[in-house]
Image (spheres, rainbow, N blue to C red):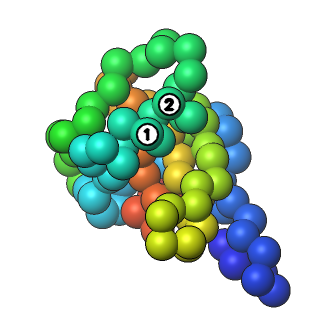
């Protein structure tokens, strides 16, 4: 959520969410994000796959990430069936 130029997360850690669009972050960018989302390597990670649309999960981590182009986004680590996926805020809705 962007209020007066400030980027504020819409969901908290521990919130149950549903995948609206199955477009999670993949590849090398996902590898970098997972280092911040799950530094203790607690969960299995999926770098190249994506869950089905409508899958339910729980948010276990969130970070603000600034990409190489300079834009800042909020990414959520969502645990779906014991696998961690990285999603942007626009791809999730409350369960």
Q: Which mark is residue 32?
A: 1
Query: Which residue corresponds to the image point at 27% horizontal and 32% vertical from the top-left?
Result: 46
Q: Residue at x 30, y 44 (%)?
A: 28
Please give the name of the residue rendered at 56% of the width and 14% of the height, measured from the top-left corner.
Answer: 40
Residue 21, image x, y percentages: 30, 63
Q: Where is residue 8 shown, x and y percent of the image?
A: 74, 65
Closest to the observer, 65 or 61:
65
| Image vertical order of residue 35 relative to residue 53, above or below | above
Residue 42: image location, x then y, percent:
49, 13
Q: Residue placed farthest to the bottom in the image?
A: 4
Q: Residues within 10 Å of mark 2 (few under 14, many from 20)?
A: few
Query: In this figure, which residue is indicated by the disc labeled 2?
Result: 35
Secondary element at image label 2: helix
Residue at image coords 55%, 34%: 37
| Count of marks placed on residues | 2
Left or right of residue 16, residue 23 in this image? left
The residues bearing labels 1 and 2 have C-alpha atoms spaced at a distance of 5 Å
Q: Is residue 89 left or right of residue 82?
A: right
Q: Is residue 73 above or below residue 44?
A: below
Determine contact: label 1, label 2, CB under 8 Å. Answer: yes
Query: Visible in this render: residue 54?
Result: no
Q: Secondary structure at mark 1?
A: helix
Image quadrant in which the N terminus is located: bottom right
The image shows residue 72, relative to residue 35, as above or below, that is below
């Amino acid at each position: 959520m962007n209020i007066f130029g400030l980027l504020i997360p819409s969901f908290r850690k521990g919130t149950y969410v549903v995948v609206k669009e199955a477009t999670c972050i993949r590849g090398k960018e996902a590898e970098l994000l997972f280092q911040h989302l799950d530094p203790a390597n607690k969960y299995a990670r999926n770098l190249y796959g994506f869950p089905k649309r409508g899958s339910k999960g729980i948010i276990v981590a969130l970070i603000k990430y600034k990409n190489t182009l300079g834009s800042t986004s909020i990414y959520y680590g969502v645990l779906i069936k014991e696998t961690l996926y990285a999603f942007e805020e626009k791809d999730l809705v409350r369960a």
